Image (tube, rainbow, N blue to C red):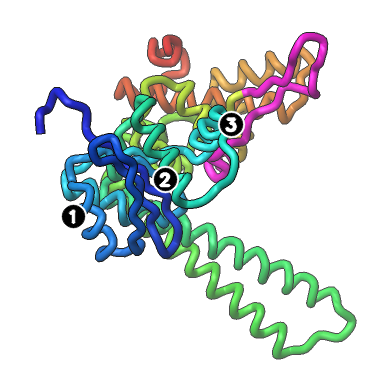
């Protein structure tokens, strides 16, 4: 294919079992439905060709196998935020919804809009994210069992068998969490040894948070400035004003990054005492009458700015040093 010509676009609406495919042949729109498995992927490539721009939505885990397969076949893949596609459809006043229509809208979006080409994560990052998900599931189970145990111990009559089983389950879950977290941190330290050392030099950030930050940010390689990192963590302020209408206070977006926000918030308590810049920021905001929680959220933002600047510069934390990366977006 002539490299000067744009790649043909293929829109793919993904569900758990099937793929609704929309493509064009001589300006004529065609549809195809295949199974969401390797046999269906092969049929898709056989019909549309590998040298295409495949546009799909990020639908949980259902798109990953297809995205990896198409990338291995030499195709270009664009994985879109479903909200972006929904707004694009609404903008064109579309009525009705079906898998075929959604696939056609994905085709149109790829033809009309510039899209960012998706790249697969390193294998170690994929494994680490899986371990992170398992850790979160185990922690939820541990919390549930702990609450059940506490409730049981408040009862006037307690079954010894029930008490023993809950205690054994809680102990087993605790050991499992510790084992998975240890494996996760070991993998991250092997892959990001230098970055882990740099991040741990920041007062307030420990080993676990440094690892979670690197996993969350993919080693900080996909960010051009700290504002992108803060936005991904859901720590950007969101304001609702229009004319004389003001809807409540300015709050953070909380869009994505819930786990890392929680880690940073816990770190902010130590940072406001031991981190020079964070302490000055916290004290200044509290002196102005800001709520303590609001000031801690500002400290979370400051920690992310410091983390971005330190990893990008390769220079460890210095109490009286301000990196240009932290100042210039």
Q: Is residue 286 left or right of residue 322?
A: right
What is the number of callouts on the image?
3
Viewer-nearest residue: 259 or 44: 44
Residue, disc 1: 46
Where residue 194 appears, as percent x and y from the top left, is 28, 35
Distance Cα–Cα, label 2 vs label 3: 16 Å
- Quarter in which the N terminus is drawn: top left
Which of the marked residues, 3 or 1, is nearer the chain's N terminus?
1
Q: CA distance from mark 1 to mark 2?
A: 18 Å
Give neighbour class at mark 2: few <14, some 14-19, many 20+ (Cα, 10 Å). many
Q: Is residue 6 left or right of residue 280?
A: left
> In the rendered structure, are the residues bearing label 1 and label 2 in contact, judged by CB atoms less than 8 Å apart?
no
Q: CA distance from mark 3 to mark 1?
A: 34 Å
Foreground: 306 or 226? Answer: 226
Q: In this rendered view, identify the residue nearer to me: 298 or 315.
A: 298
Q: Position of residue 66 (x, y in %)?
A: 31, 54
Q: Is residue 113 left or right of residue 273?
A: left
Residue pointed to by mark 2: 103
Q: Earlier in the sequence, mark 2 or mark 3?
A: 3
Name the secondary structure under disc 1: helix
Q: Is residue 194 visible to us here?
A: no
Q: Is residue 151 above or below residue 285?
A: below
Residue 165 seen by the camera: yes
Residue 257 falls within the magenta-colored stretch: yes
**For the magenta stretch, what is the residue range?**
237-264
Residue sitting at x 35%, y 46%:
22
Quadrant of residue 281 within the rendered picture = top right
Q: Residue furthest left?
A: 2
Q: Residues within 10 Å of mark 3 (few under 14, many from 20)?
A: few
Q: Secondary structure at mark 2?
A: helix
Please report the residue visible at 49 percent of the width from the left and 69 percent of the height from the top.
Answer: 175
């Amino acid at each position: 294919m002539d490299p000067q010509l744009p790649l043909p676009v293929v829109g793919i609406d993904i569900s758990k079992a099937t793929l609704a495919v929309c493509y064009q042949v001589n300006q004529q729109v065609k549809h195809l439905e295949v199974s969401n498995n390797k046999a269906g992927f092969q049929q898709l490539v056989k019909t549309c060709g590998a040298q295409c721009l495949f546009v799909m939505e990020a639908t949980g885990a259902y798109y990953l196998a297809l995205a990896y397969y198409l990338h291995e076949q030499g195709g270009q893949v664009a994985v879109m935020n479903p909200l972006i596609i929904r707004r694009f459809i609404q903008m064109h006043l579309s009525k009705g919804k079906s898998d075929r229509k959604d696939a056609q809208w994905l085709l149109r979006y790829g033809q009309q809009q510039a899209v960012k080409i998706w790249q697969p994560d390193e294998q170690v990052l994929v494994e680490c994210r899986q371990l992170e998900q398992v850790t979160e599931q185990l922690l939820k189970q541990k919390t549930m069992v702990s609450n059940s145990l506490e409730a049981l111990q408040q009862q006037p009559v307690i079954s010894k068998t029930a008490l023993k089983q809950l205690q054994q389950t809680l102990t087993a879950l605790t050991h499992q969490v510790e084992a998975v977290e240890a494996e996760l941190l070991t993998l991250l330290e092997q892959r990001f040894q230098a970055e882990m050392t740099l991040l741990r030099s920041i007062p307030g950030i420990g080993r676990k948070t440094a690892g979670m930050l690197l996993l969350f940010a993919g080693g900080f390689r996909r960010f051009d400035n700290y504002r992108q990192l803060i936005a991904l963590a859901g720590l950007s302020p969101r304001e609702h004003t229009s004319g004389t209408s003001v809807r409540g206070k300015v709050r953070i977006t909380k869009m994505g990054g819930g786990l890392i926000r929680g880690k940073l918030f816990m770190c902010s308590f130590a940072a406001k005492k031991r981190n020079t810049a964070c302490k000055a920021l916290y004290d200044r905001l509290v002196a102005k009458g800001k709520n303590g929680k609001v000031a801690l959220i500002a400290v979370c933002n400051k920690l992310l700015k410091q983390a971005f600047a330190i990893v990008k510069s390769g220079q460890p934390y210095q109490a009286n040093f301000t990196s240009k990366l932290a100042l210039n977006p």
